[in-house]
Amino acid sequence: KVTMAVKDSVEMKASSKIGGGESFIDIAWTGVVGATASDLIAVTCAGSEWDIGEVFDAIPTASGNEDVGMESGSIRIPTLPDARCPYVVRYLQAVVSPSLRHSDYEGAHASQSNRTHSAVVIGELKIEHESGAFGVRPSQIHLSFTEKRDEMLVIWVSGHGLLLDDNDSVPTVRYGFEKGKLDRVAHGTTSTYHASDMCNAPANRTGIQHFLPPGDINRVVLSGLPTSTQVFYRVGNGGALGWSSERVFTSRKSMSERAVKFLMYADQALPVPLFAPAWRLVGQVKRDIEENGFGGFLLHPGDLGYAEGSTFIWDLWGSLIEPISSRVAYMVTIGNHEYDHTGSKIDPSGAPPTGWHPQEQGKHPTEWGNFGDDSQGECGVPTQARYNGTSSDGNDIFWYSFKEGGVHVVVMSSEHDWTVGSIQYKWLANDLASAASNRTLTPWIVLATHRMMYTTQLQEEGDFKVSLAMREHLEPLLYKYRVNLMLVGHQHSYERSCPAYKGECVDDGVSGTTHIVAGSAGASAEKGGFSPSLGNFSVAHVNDYGYLRLS
């Protein structure tokens, strides 16, 4: 536990407020007596129970400071998301245990230490929001396709029950086709979710590291949009402070247009401390959208921010990708870290309780699979509440399809039963048959899901067994309907196959499917190499960070 006596001997300052547009916040301090490498800067919510295991992050004061033991210093952290509560930053100093380490304090996803530490807060700083209040300004703006080509769905988060203006108290988007001239208005709906909606612990627990009220999730559909046109827009829930800045996206292509440029990545984990390759990747993707024409859409098939029950990580990840997701349709499905669970509830997908675990005795004759509780009980609840699929005949974000340009994209769930005869299998077969019936209209068919069908990654025996089962059950469909490309994540690396069928490169170079793994958007890179002993189909592979540009 942490002693709550706060000594005023340390002066702390922040370089900026939340919501001011800065990429980083510098936290500076002076007046520390007896500073050591064990000292920490802890970030938490004002009013929260002060427990060392209940902080958003705890960063060693030695980070970025060459002179440990100095009375003054500073650290730089990425700007914090609007978590709808005031932030408090505390300078924490061990007073009993000299062996106090950063690993004992790690926030968000660290295992709680069984040891009790004695420490004291010797400095405290409240970080304000530039609007004057948290939860007022819209945040985490993202776009999604709908079933209709002349529509775009706009989604964002705001403070719960925000009623600032009787005339604009519902979710509202003001938009138009000229910059600064937003002469059209659309209204929508609001929803939220609760800890009790989750399938099992720890996701259904309330606390700084677990569930916090996620605010209102607002949805507004813009309809009647002309094709291939820039649309300028602002979102809000009313009042002078309740509006976003003006954003822009390009509406969908007409049915006759064939060319499209889009992006794909997966596994964008946000480890603590708050520094990771995911931040650098966002800037590169944004430039590709704005300067290089990759504005068709973005596919993120699973393992989004690795929230695993933490509302703060959902807020952090949603804010991180907003420069991308507010510019292009951000199309997702669930991965193991959003869905896999063992709870007794029926989750939002309608699947039976406990989730899908084909490795368990009696579930499958060969007992393959490594499906566990990687969502920590979320079971897809936050993902389904925050994002959207497109198909009325599909299953929300879990499986759906859409067409853009000459590409028919099929998004399926690798975390639900996809074996022959399953509900998802039957839907997939019907969708592929429909898309393949007119290859003039859809010359390209792309399948996106989380797990791999083809991989030569070492040290991943469980994933390899799943890939073989996917070949057994699903590859005949891919071959029959000539699926050109399969895009997946899960393994934190890049790998591309030749056009393949039954584990071999096809002689004609076209009748097989090219498989690309790109689970390299921020999660820790794989340590194992690649081996031809697992297949001779791999033509390029690397354990590194990156994303795909497709045109």
Image (spheres, grey):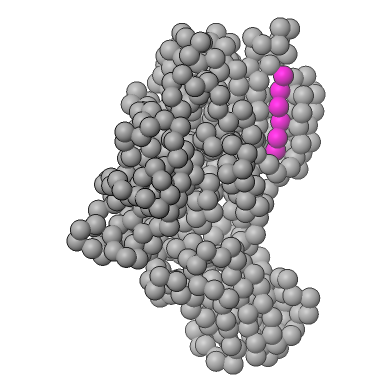
Residue found at the very far left of the displayed protein: 166
Taking the magenta stretch, the answer to whether it contains residue 496 is yes
**Residue 348 visible in the current orientation:** yes
Q: Position of residue 287 (x, y in %)?
A: 62, 46
Q: Residue at x 63, y 39 (%)?
A: 292
**Residue 523 visible in the current orientation:** no
Residue found at the very far bottom of the displayed protein: 9
Task: Give the vertical position of 403 relative to 89 (above or below).
Answer: above
- 9 and 363: which is toward the camera: 9
Position of residue 253 in the picture relative to residue 543 (left or right): left
- 333 and 209: which is toward the camera: 333
Numbered-mark total: 0
Q: Residue at x 48, y 78 (%)?
A: 126
Taking the magenta stretch, the answer to whether it contains residue 19 is no
Q: Residue at x 25, y 53 (%)?
A: 170
Task: Give the vertical position of 277 relative to 99 (above or below).
Answer: above
Q: Quadrant of residue 516?
A: top right
Task: Give the vertical position of 94 relative to 445 (above or below).
Answer: below
Q: Residue at x 65, y 59 (%)?
A: 275
Q: Position of residue 179 (x, y in %)?
A: 43, 49
Q: Position of residue 312 (x, y in %)?
A: 47, 59
Q: Position of residue 371 (x, y in %)?
A: 54, 35
- 211 and 151: which is toward the camera: 151
* Quadrant, the C terminus: top right
* Bounds of the magenta segment: 492-498
